[in-house]
Amino acid sequence: METKIDYIDEQTVLDYIPRNATLHSLAEFFSACSDATRNKIICALCISEMCVSDLSRILGINQTTCSHQLRLLRAADIVSQRRDGKVIYYSLKNRKIENVLLAGVDFLDL
């Protein structure tokens, strides 16, 4: 007895997969979000823009660590900064990241 195999249209699969540049950007985004400290910073910035000293105090991390993580988040285009005198304030570049984090929590059923 022969087993019937249903074939999936190859072009349908290929059309669904984003372009390589998009896949590369997506991998960089997930890499930037792959650290618990960076996720804490992102969550804090969902509430309000903050400077390094406020973030480090609220999150209980030292300022050097906070600055380093913010630099990585800026490089990933997740966080932006603005200067007010001597103080630099950080904020989310795109508020949609909050939905991404919430979807991740929902996916993990936490």
Image (cartoon, helix red, strand yellow):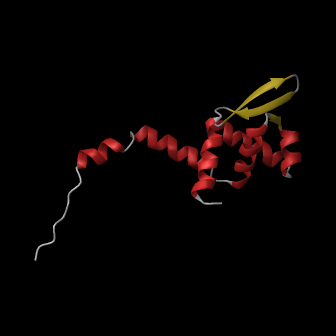
Residue 79, located in which quarter of the rendered image? Answer: top right
> Looking at the image, which residue sits at the far bottom?
1
Quadrant, the N terminus = bottom left
Residue 97 shown left or right of residue 81 in the figure: left
Q: Residue visible at 83% across and 43% down? A: 55
The one nearer the camera, 108 or 84, is: 108
* Closer to the camera in the image, 62 or 108: 108
Q: Is residue 95 left or right of residue 60?
A: left
What quarter of the picture does the C terminus occupy? Answer: bottom right
The answer to whether 29 is drawn above or below residue 86 in the figure is below
Q: Position of residue 84 (x, y in %)?
A: 85, 23
Residue at horizontal 24%, vertical 54%?
Answer: 8
- Which residue is drawn at the image coordinates 66% and 41% (left, top)? 98
Q: Is residue 105 above or below residue 16?
A: below
| Position of residue 13 measured from the top left corner of the image (x, y, whole percent) | 30, 48
- Let me know if residue 19 appears in the view: yes
The residue lying furthest to the top in this view is: 85
Q: How many marks?
A: 0
Side of 2 relative to 51 (left or right): left
State left or right for residue 4 relative to residue 44. left
Q: Residue at x 57, y 44 (%)?
A: 29
Q: Position of residue 43 (x, y in %)?
A: 73, 45
- The reply to whether residue 69 is in sight is no
